[in-house]
Image (spheres, rainbow, N blue to C red):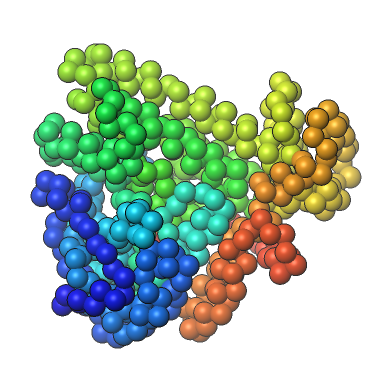
Amino acid sequence: MTHNNKEMGWNFDNSYARLPESFFESTEPTPVRSPELVILNKPLAKSLGLDVKKLQSEEGIDVFAGNKIPEGALPIAQAYAGHQFGHFTMLGDGRAVLLGEQGTPSGERFDIQLKGSGRTPFSRGGDGRATIGPMLREYIISEAMHALRIPTNRSLSVVTTGESVIRETELPGAILTRVAASHLRIGTFEYVVKWGTVEELRTLADYAIKRHFPDIEENEDRYLSLFQEVIKRQAGLITKWQLVGFIHGVMNTDNMTISGETIDYGPCAFMDDYDPATVFSSIDVQGRYAYQNQPAIGQWNLARFAEALLPLFHEKQDHAVELAQEAHSKFEDLYHSHWLAGMRKKLGIQNEEEQDKSLIEDLLRIMKKHGADFTNTFRALTLDKPEDTAMNGTTEFTHWYEQWQARLDRQEEPKPSSYKLMKNSNPAVIPRNHRVEEALEAAVEKGDYSVMEQLIEVLSNPYAYSPEQEEYTNLPEPSNRPYRTFCGT
């Protein structure tokens, strides 16, 4: 089953598989009948040092399908735990296999993972398979997030398997090849602290530091530094989500990475009308992971990370808890300073005034009151077309607009530079939910991938403000039913 054609460019190392055996299970992907390539991310493939032409050959497609293992790969399923909607549970890669870590021409290292590649020891009764819709959805949205300059795992390819998968109905099976800085999660640490030893926990922490934070390796308090670095990355990441109206939908601790990348695109979606209480996920009945709750949930998840790391902070638990609490308390200020800086950019504000926060909050309050679209409101302001907003003509918005213009006039920088800053900070297009659904329906129901390919092309440069993007800024038709997303497992 091993494939020795190195001409494809595969250059695997398996550092995670050299960690203690309890961290993973050796697992071969389950071969599929007749794989076909649906989409290949050619720019990403090139950056990974892979030969695009050879990846599209029968041998290349067999690798993406799990039918052949490239030389040097060592397939494993990773063990992890997690707090799912607040409740702790044992998890692990139930339908994913890590082939190994690709070394790139620029000296970087990325996990190459097959998602939907069959049962593993962690499948817990599941079939380990995935269907075409959710895999294409992850491809579209993860690549859109990358174009939005938001840290994210990425998608290299999707193949169909030629086999059906039974969910509510019979659906075409598919496998996604996911590329990530790593798949280390807060839940990985929770797993080791629950079922491993302190030495194994130290080994995992040292590995995370070496892989993601080599600058702190020599620090005397490197484990506390690790916690602080992850806090910084998660505060920055969640800020970026909030600034584009992205709702992750399933912020369990097993979906929060140590690298600070967005991972798991199951029930995610982008907000249309601005409403902080927006929830899309069908399983989030309490609204735990609503848009407005994402920063607080990020902080809650980081508290679970701190609890896992306590034995490494200090041998005296009381002192370890003090150190953790002090570091953890910085998250809120970090997040708010990032958010305020990001919102200033969205409004072209290039210096700081005390009243900026109230100016921003006033706009958001008016947007919510009038059901204004989040993305299109900032797009209209960027183009200086206030008449294109849902709030135009109201007394409060007219007053706000005058205040905003006066604020820009007080800056040393000329107004054109403010609008340039806004254009670089406010995407003209996002993966609108109705556009994503339209693309998935064409692909799943008709085998027509052209709608998806066009959508991906439009989303690849969201700050272009190009004529081709115009129609993708249109809002969905009014509906009596709220938009709902599903995990797709």
Give x and y (percent) for residue 20: 11, 46
Give x and y (percent) for residue 6: 25, 74
Q: Report the front residue among 96 and 275.
A: 96
Displayed quadrant of residue 67: bottom left
Relative to 300, residue 445 above or below: below
Give x and y (percent) for residue 122: 19, 57
Q: How many marks?
A: 0
- The answer to whether one can see residue 413 in this image is yes
Give x and y (percent) for residue 378: 72, 47
Q: Look at 71% across and 44% down and name the residue there.
A: 421
Q: Report the front residue among 2 and 311.
A: 2
Relative to 387, residue 33 above or below: below
Looking at the rendered image, the quarter that the C terminus falls into is: bottom left
Displayed quadrant of residue 160: bottom left
Looking at the rendered image, the quarter that the N terminus falls into is: bottom left
Q: Report the front residue among 38 and 374.
A: 38
Q: Look at 44% across and 52% down and name the residue there.
A: 152
* In this rendering, position of residue 403 left or right of residue 426: right
Q: Look at 87% across and 41% down and name the residue there.
A: 394
Q: Look at 41% across and 68% down and name the residue there.
A: 45
* In this rendering, position of residue 224 left or right of residue 273: left
- The answer to whether one can see residue 95 in this image is no
